[in-house]
Amino acid sequence: MADKPASPDTSPNPEVLSMPIVPPSPDVVIVGGGVIGLSAAWQLLQDGIDAVVLDPAPGTGASHAAAGMLAPIHEAYWGESHILELNLAASRAWPAFADSLGVDTVDYRHNGMLMAAYDADDKALLDNLGDLHEQEGLPVERLRSRECRAREPLLAPGIRGGVYSPLDHQVNPRRVVAELLNRVPVVPVSAAEVAPHQVITDDGQVMACRQVVVAAGAWTGRLLGVPIRPIKGQILRLSGPEGLLRLPVRGVVRGSSVYAVPRSDGEIVVGATQEEQGFDTRVTAGGVYELLRDVLALLPGLSEIDLVETRAGLRPGAPDNAPIIGIGADGIVYATGHYRNGILTSPITATAVSALVQGHQTPLDLSPFSPSRFDARPTGRTPDPEHLSGVPA
Ligand SMILES: Cc1cc2nc3c(=O)[nH]c(=O)nc-3n(C[C@H](O)[C@H](O)[C@H](O)COP(=O)(O)OP(=O)(O)OC[C@H]3O[C@@H](n4cnc5c(N)ncnc54)[C@H](O)[C@@H]3O)c2cc1C
């Protein structure tokens, strides 16, 4: 006679009770809730894939500091054609992305960008960039001093000339992140360890899923063996009458770079320093001084308006300045290293991440951005200081 099946024991098992609570498994877990992780999650959700973001402090990293220039043309540098191609594709993706979030909600503005030279040496630097623009067939207008001031009357009368790019545009990154946070589920925990199909959190939870994506910005190197380092940027926010500054202006002032980006509500973002200081987010007297000195030389009329915020953020930078987007040898999807252009490249990164997760073709050739390009190299290579000098972001 067969044994009578034991009736189920419904009393709590003390071992199970002491185990961490495991939330229901989503298809995709994204580590990092900056603009990159959040836009990737939003794209996955739109594609019908269940995604969740882990971040103890979502939206407070580099994405909170960023100015929001969407500037493939003014971000073009010699020797970086593959980055230019990515940035141009990202730029083309922005109108639809802004539309999906609400153009006014995110203060997306398509009114071009002006780059101005303060003195003759600065003009020579701009002319050199102009040669690159011409070589790449980019649509720019080289302007004399008077023509620059006709477009932006706030410019100092002594400026030597400039370059206007009708293609460059801008958005308010804080509003983008806030809108994405309304649409994407975020669990406020930190990842301690990652594997292709699971994340172990700082508090010991094990989250299983079909695919892990890491988008942890400047902190990615702490989770994965890629040479991502933080590049500090100090940035200021001024506040004045709406429409005081018509256009985003980038300037080269005695060899230093500075920019001023106006928002619809009268805020003007002035940035940014580029510093190799590790994970240091202090705002320094020297940093603020340099930014104000250069922006007021270029746009003296800003001296009367309020200085309302000073801040520093950490750009995630790879040794070759290009982002890392792709599936690593470890089976994890990487979406990091967006350096000076993470706001610009967020929509195209999001589409690429969704395609990688689904095994579909990506929107562009990602081989120059593959995580494996660092496999044979030592990590933590120091950047070329010449490349960094005079480059605004
Ligand atoms: C001063 C400044 C100005 C800039 N201006 C522009 C601009 O005008 N245009 C432009 O396109 N780009 C600009 N950038 C660059 C842009 O801000 C970045 O490239 C972009 O924000 C990177 O986004 P991210 O999501 O990768 O990183 P972040 O926004 O830094 O987000 C990373 C997130 O990961 C989280 N995280 C880290 N470790 C873990 C972990 N272990 N577990 C869970 N979560 C974790 C962090 O809490 C953080 O929220 C600027 C940057 C700075 C600093």
Image (cartoon, grey):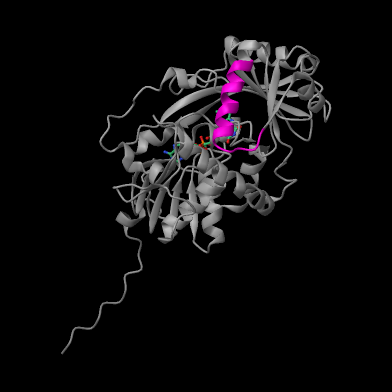
Residue at 45% from the left image edge and 27% from the top image edge? 230
Q: Nearer the viewer, residue 72 or 283?
A: 72
Q: Nearer the viewer, residue 379 or 62?
A: 379
Q: Nearer the viewer, residue 120 or 280?
A: 120
Give coordinates of residue 333: x percent, y percent: 39, 49
Q: Is residue 387 above or below residue 3?
A: above
Q: Is residue 356 above or below residue 165?
A: below
Give coordinates of residue 214: x percent, y percent: 42, 44
Does residue 48 show up magenta in the picture?
A: no
Q: Is residue 75 above or below residue 372?
A: above
Residue at 75% from the left image edge and 17% from the top image edge? 299
- Residue span colored magenta: 123-140
Residue at 40% from the left image edge and 42% from the top image edge? 368
Q: Quadrant of residue 137?
A: top right
Residue 149 visible somewhere in the drawing: yes
Residue at 43% from the left image edge and 21% from the top image edge? 278
Q: Quadrant of the C terminus?
A: top right
Give coordinates of residue 216: x percent, y percent: 45, 39
Residue 325 located left or right of residue 154 = left
Q: Residue furthest bottom?
A: 1
Q: Nearer the viewer, residue 334 or 196?
A: 334
Q: Quadrant of residue 67?
A: top right
Residue 393 visible somewhere in the drawing: no
Residue 360 located left or right of residue 161 = left
Residue 115 located left or right of residue 137 = right
Residue 268 located left or right of residue 85 = right
Q: How many marks?
A: 0
| Principal secondary structure, stretch drawn in magenta | helix
Give coordinates of residue 96: x percent, y percent: 65, 53
Q: Quadrant of the N terminus?
A: bottom left
Q: Residue furthest left?
A: 1
